[in-house]
Image (spheres, helix red, strand yellow):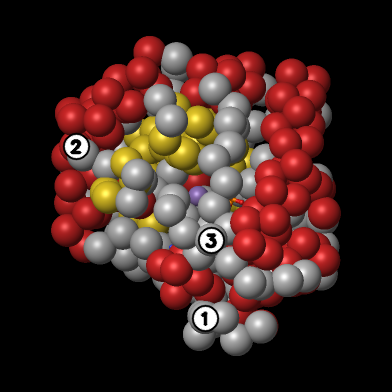
Amino acid sequence: MLDCDLHCHSNISDGMLPPAELVARAAGRGVKIMALTDHDDVRGLAEAASVAATHGIDFINGVEISVTWNKHNVHIVGLNIDPENAELVSGLKVLRAGRAVRAKLMAESLAQAGIAGALEGAYKYAANPEIIGRTHFARFLVDGGHAKDVHSVFKHFLIKGKPGYVSHQWADLKDAVHWITTSGGIAVIAHPGRYLSGRKPMGRPTLKNLIVEFVEHGGRGIEVVTGSHTPEQYAEFARYATEFGLLSSCGSDFHAPGESFRDLGRLPDLPLECKPVWQAWGRASLNS
Ligand code: AMP
Ligand code: MN
Ligand code: MN
Ligand code: MN
């Protein structure tokens, strides 16, 4: 079991716990190396880092950037970034601005399907209104009895062809990787097993094209172990890491107690052939 969790969310994005509580929960579950990777926002990092220090956790500044690549919605995690880097900060700010517009359109689409009050309903769950997103709408829909839990919301709503779905233009892949690398970080393809083409899983040739372009732009890592991957997918993406010379990352993608695929930490080990991403940081405590 790994005591390293390099992907999770606080209520600065669509997690439910404030950064301090998230870090305390991670500490309680034995996490020793942790990155907070909120969607499109770095404003939880200072609080998380200071609480992590009190627990003796080696804390890594992170972010998860929303990207549109060839009409596909993909997520790029940045690890060991500088949250004060001007290009990163201004890029994320522009990216966040699109969310309010999308949220209005999502609520209109749900209203057409007979579900009223979704905009106000979703914002009630968004501690940071700038990151209003599908998870907040999903919690509103569960609360209103439209689905039994957040996972089933994403079968009947908020996805292509279903009520509440709105197509959206996120950051360019090239820009996202650039913001991360220019701030000193390592760009990592998040949960490669989760991507879709329309409503079907992304085909492997398409995924390989994504990886090739990502590497051309300076991307260096891929998540092999993540909350939503099966053991077969750990093996599959370990092979991709080797094939493309990528560092391997691991993280729970935890959002909220009882809601996510996995809780914080206690992740299965990376397959033996993987080069862990933390080796790149050269910090003694991470390489022991
Ligand atoms: P957004 O950035 O607003 O498009 O929202 C994306 C978020 O929705 C992801 O980060 C997940 O937290 C959540 N999400 C997407 N698909 C699912 C799913 N199948 N089950 C649970 N949560 C999901
Ligand atoms: Mn999320
Ligand atoms: Mn993601
Ligand atoms: Mn995530």
Quadrant where the N terminus is found in the figure:
bottom left
Secondary structure beneath label 2 = helix
- Residue that mark 3 sits on: 163
Q: Amino acid at mark 1?
A: Ala
- Residue 177 lies, with reference to residue 257, above or below; the image says above
71 vs 193, nearest the viewer: 71
- Residue 213 lies, with reference to residue 270, above or below; the image says above
Q: Are marks 2 and 3 in contact (CB under 8 Å)?
A: no
Q: Position of residue 156 (x, y in %)?
A: 45, 68
- Residue 72 lies, with reference to residue 142, above or below; the image says above
- Other-residue count near label 2 (Cα within 10 Å), few / some / many at <14 / 14–19 / ≥20: few
Q: Position of residue 247 (x, y in %)?
A: 35, 34
Secondary structure beneath label 1 = loop
For residue 177, side relative to residue 52 (left or right): left
Q: Nearer the viewer, mark 1 or mark 2?
A: 1
202 vs 1, nearest the viewer: 202
- Residue that mark 2 sits on: 204
Q: Position of residue 10 (x, y in %)?
A: 69, 61
User: Which residue is at 35% across, 44% downward?
Assistant: 198
Q: Amino acid at mark 3?
A: Pro
Mark closer to the chain start, 1 or 3: 1
Gap between marks 2 and 3 measured at Cα: 28 Å
- Other-residue count near label 1 (Cα within 10 Å), few / some / many at <14 / 14–19 / ≥20: some
Gap between marks 1 and 2 measured at Cα: 31 Å
Place residue 274 in its image quadrant. Answer: top left
User: Which residue is at 70% across, 58% downward?
Assistant: 107
Gap between marks 1 and 3 measured at Cα: 13 Å
Place residue 66 in its image quadrant. Answer: top right
Q: Nearer the viewer, mark 1 or mark 3?
A: 3
The tag on residue 147 is 1
